[in-house]
Image (cartoon, rainbow, N blue to C red):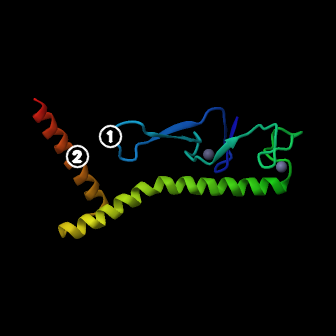
Amino acid sequence: MYICYECSGEFETPDNLVEKHLLDAPPYEVIYVCPFCNSSNFKVKSHSHCCCCGAKLSNTDSEFCSNECRNKGIKLWKNEFKRRKQLLINPINIIIRELENYNKEHNTNYSYGQYVAIIENQRRKQKCAKRKKDI
Ligand SMILES: [Zn+2]
Ligand SMILES: [Zn+2]
């Protein structure tokens, strides 16, 4: 059983979303999310040991042996979540940097969407050219 921190929903199996990161081919990143609100901020509900200090739990509905551990654990997990989110955001930042360079180089003023479309077009053209050569 899993429990969602975002909407407090409980579920047996998380949904999965495929994050392609603008890649043409696998491996894509698979993100497991709450089926109710699509948040990845959820945890396994039943635990035999404290998630923070590892002490045996008498109440398996709780992840932590004490409020102190709970606060510590949630804080750690939130940091981990932030770090993961940052990783997801990073590819976009890279493209934005590329876009700024492209605009400077070509004296253009493309938006993020326009730039992504242009790059995608160029990639397709290159593929076609390659295929023609092969024939
Ligand atoms: Zn949820
Ligand atoms: Zn503990």
| Kind of residue sitting beneath label 2 | Arg
The residue at the far right in this view is 58
- Where is residue 79 shown, x and y percent of the image? 64, 57
At a point 13% along the width and 40% down the height, the residue shown is 129
Mark 1 CB near ligand 1 (8 Å cut): no
Side (left or right) of 119 relative to 30: left
Q: Residues within 10 Å of mark 1 (few under 14, many from 20)?
A: few
Residue 109 is at least partly visible in this image: no
Q: Secondary structure at mark 2?
A: helix
Report the label total: 2
At a point 73% along the width and 39% down the height, the residue shown is 45
Q: Quadrant of residue 107?
A: bottom left
On residue 123, which mark appears?
A: 2
* Residue topped by disc 1: 24
Q: Residues within 10 Å of mark 2 (few under 14, many from 20)?
A: few
At a point 57% along the width and 46% down the height, the residue shown is 37
Side (left or right) of 65 relative to 88: right
